[in-house]
């Protein structure tokens, strides 16, 4: 009987891992980049625009190495990701207190954060230093939003990325069986980070920021990746938050997680319990996600 595991949103069998080992033996001259590219081509692992998902494959390989499943070739150079992560520590911005009414900040400007821009450095720095989970590089399809007030001060950061591979309450609500979930997971995105900087204390700002992003994310996703998303999800740590802003922005509370990590299938890794929320972006989202 084949063992399977989910890594980087992809289900891997023992045969898949053996393929990776065989490729490294047969091609000892390949570096990590070449290996990830060829692995994508072998699996035909591509995004909706037809581009190979080589960055996702690279992260998958690193996770396999950390688990002791494979030993990757020695790095040939310092990865750019490491340089970018070191630069996060150098980012600073004004932390002058922002209090008052939401109307005093409006209109808020919602910006999609472009890679390698000044806003990207600001966005990464804010999350790295002020979000309780921190922030490193994102892999795979993702969307980053930076919201600024009318004085161009940053007041919110939102990051959307890969949906959780499995969540019982969510899957039941959508109507997913394992096959439909595997086919349509890219039609759902997870709000993995949401930050209002600690020096910004403005009632209703968080729910308003969510509402502004909700209005545009489907079109933004379509423009960037060539396919839409039909619903949003998020997981709120019960030990820290109550999910008030999501409730105020009309997200639907579905239940709670079972205390395991997002891709863990063998019931060993324990994590804090989280409230599960979903926000449908279109009326027929369940039909779209179950095709």
Image (spheres, rainbow, N blue to C red):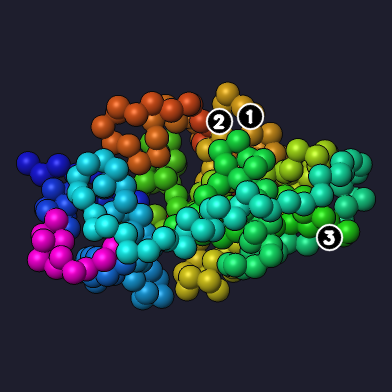
Q: Looking at the image, is 48 positioned above or below residue 232? A: below
Give the spatial CA distance, label 3 vs label 1: 28 Å
User: Which x, y percent locates residue 107?
Assistant: 85, 59
As drawn, is 272 to the left or to the right of 116? Answer: left
Q: Residue at point 69% right, 34% down? A: 244
User: Which x, y percent locates residue 206?
Assistant: 73, 44
In the picture, residue 183 is in which quadrant?
bottom left
Q: Residue at point 10% right, 44% down? A: 2
Q: Nearer the viewer, residue 172 or 114?
A: 114
In the picture, residue 186 is in which quadrant?
bottom left
Give the spatial CA distance, label 2 vs label 1: 6 Å
Q: Residue furthest top?
A: 239
Which residue position holds label 3?
Answer: 152
Tell me, yes or no, whether the two marked residues, 2 and 1, touch with CB atoms within 8 Å: yes
Q: Looking at the image, is 71 positioned above or below residue 112? A: above
Tell me, yes or no, whether the two marked residues, 3 and 1, touch with CB atoms within 8 Å: no
Q: Which mark is residue 274?
A: none
Does dot 3 land on a helix, a strand or a loop?
loop
Does dot 2 land on a helix, a strand or a loop?
strand
Stretch in magenta: 21-32
User: Which x, y percent locates residue 185?
Assistant: 39, 55
Which residue position holds label 2?
Answer: 237
Q: Which mark is residue 241?
A: 1
Q: Earlier in the sequence, mark 2 or mark 3?
A: 3
Q: Nearer the viewer, residue 181 or 258?
A: 258
Q: Nearer the viewer, residue 280 or 205?
A: 205
Q: Nearer the viewer, residue 241 or 92?
A: 92
Tell me, yes or no, whether the two marked residues, 2 and 3, touch with CB atoms within 8 Å: no
User: Which x, y percent locates residue 21?
Assistant: 14, 56
The quarter of the rendered structure image containing the C terminus is bottom left
Q: Nearer the viewer, mark 3 or mark 1?
A: 3
């Amino acid at each position: 009987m084949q063992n399977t595991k989910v890594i980087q949103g992809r289900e891997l069998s023992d045969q898949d891992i053996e393929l990776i080992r065989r490729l490294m033996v047969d091609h000892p001259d390949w570096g990590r980049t070449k290996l990830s590219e060829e692995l994508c081509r072998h699996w035909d692992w591509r995004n909706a625009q037809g581009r190979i998902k080589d960055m996702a494959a690279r992260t998958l390989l690193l996770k396999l190495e950390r688990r002791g499943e494979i030993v990757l070739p020695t790095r040939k150079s310092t990865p750019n990701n490491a340089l970018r992560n070191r630069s996060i520590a150098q980012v600073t911005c004004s932390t002058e207190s922002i209090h008052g009414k939401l109307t005093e900040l409006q209109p808020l400007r919602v910006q999609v954060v472009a890679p390698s821009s000044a806003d990207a450095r600001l966005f990464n720095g804010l999350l790295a230093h002020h979000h309780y989970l921190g922030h490193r590089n994102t892999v795979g399809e993702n969307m980053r939003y930076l919201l600024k007030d009318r004085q161009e001060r940053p007041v919110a950061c939102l990051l959307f990325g890969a949906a959780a591979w499995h969540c019982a309450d969510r899957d039941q609500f959508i109507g997913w069986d394992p096959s439909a979930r595997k086919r349509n997971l890219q039609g759902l995105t997870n709000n993995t980070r949401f930050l209002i900087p600690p020096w910004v204390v403005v009632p209703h700002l968080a729910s308003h920021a969510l509402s502004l992003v909700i209005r545009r994310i489907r079109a933004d996703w379509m423009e960037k990746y060539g396919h839409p998303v039909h619903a949003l999800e998020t997981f709120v740590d019960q030990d820290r938050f109550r999910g008030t802003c999501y409730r105020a922005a009309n997200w639907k509370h579905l239940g709670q997680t079972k205390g395991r990590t997002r891709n863990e299938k063998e019931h060993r890794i324990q994590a804090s319990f989280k409230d599960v929320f979903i926000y449908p972006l279109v009326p027929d989202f369940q039909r779209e996600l179950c095709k």
